[in-house]
Image (cartoon, grey):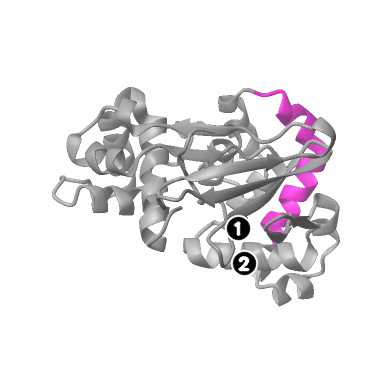
Amino acid sequence: MPHATLMLDHPAWTTTPDGRCVRACRTGETVATVIGVPTETGHGHTVDLVAPGGAPTPVIDIVDPAGASGPEEIVAPLRADGPVGRVRNPDLWDALTTSAIRQVIRADQARKLHRGFREAHGLAVDTAAGRVFLMPDPDTVSALSDAEFARVGLKFFRRVLRACADWYRKCADDWAQMTAPELVTALQAVPRIGPWSAGATVADHTGDFTYYPHSDLAVRTWAAHLAPTHAWPDDDRGFAAHWRDITGDHLSDLTLLTLAWGVRHARGATA
């Protein structure tokens, strides 16, 4: 991978004391690990992808803002940060449950709950950068009691997570054959999965942020930070329509780059 800054939006990313970032992903029947090492300049990462026995490794989409066009007040600071690399989530189950946990709470709280759930009930994976954990599988999620969901802080999410597990077991094979627009629609049949969660899931899984919910608070927040003097609509629907209009053919790239810029600057470090 050419030097690019890894986008650490997914809550499974763990940052080590020496600055490396690490994550494990299910790729079919195997588990791959992704380790990002900061470059000597401190801008960007080199990436080590590891999967057993020649199994597939996750795709990393490289998005270079140099090729994006849009309002200069938005695009200029994105160009200054340079190319972004984002790991396309190969595990639809993980993408779906992650979107479910992100519903109606702040990103930092979702990250904390996601990590606690993985550490309590997920498969441990030892990597060259330390131990990380996968999302608990559907059977594990279905077997958890109300009391256990409460213990790990997910009492509010127990119904949606159980619904995700039930529907994933029934529909995973069919979902795997669908186009992205078809999948956005199909996922909304899962109880408590609406357009926001379905769109976020498909964006995470495919790497195409055309499907991301553009009225999302994170997009609105970071767009306003990038261009504070821009006349942003106050309402969610108006913002989403305006965002799609001004980004045009670069909707996916500029949405991803804006979210990556926000993650990086919120952390005050490479993200």
Q: Residue at x 57, y 55 (%)?
A: 21
Residue 118 counted in the magenta span: no
Q: Quadrant of residue 28?
A: top right
Expressed as whole percent of the image width and height from the top left, the position of residue 184 reads: 58, 33
Quick one: label 1 or label 2, which is nearer the N terminus?
1
Q: Magenta part mainly helix, strand or loop?
A: helix
Marks 1 and 2 sit apart, C-alpha to C-alpha, by 8 Å
The quarter of the picture where the N terminus appears is top right
Are discs 1 and 2 less than 8 Å apart at CB?
A: yes
Closer to viewer: mark 1 or mark 2: 2
Expressed as whole percent of the image width and height from the top left, the position of residue 120 reads: 76, 68
In this rendering, is residue 230 above or below 22? above
Residue farthest to the front, as pictured: 40
Residue 167 counted in the magenta span: yes
Q: Is residue 217 visible?
A: no
Q: Give, as a single range, the part of the protein colored magenta.
A: 159-178
The residue singled out by tag 2 in the image is 113
Q: Is residue 228 left or right of residue 132?
A: left
Q: Residue at x 25, y 31 (%)?
A: 246
Looking at the picture, which amino acid does disc 2 mark?
Leu
Expressed as whole percent of the image width and height from the top left, the position of residue 19 reads: 53, 60
Q: Residues within 10 Å of mark 2 (few under 14, many from 20)?
A: some
Q: Residue at x 62, y 49 (%)?
A: 35
Label 2: which secondary element: helix
In this rendering, is residue 124 above or below 231? below
Q: Is residue 173 left or right of residue 68?
A: right
Q: Is residue 85 left or right of residue 120?
A: left
Q: Quadrant of residue 54?
A: top right
Q: Residue at x 48, y 32 (%)?
A: 62
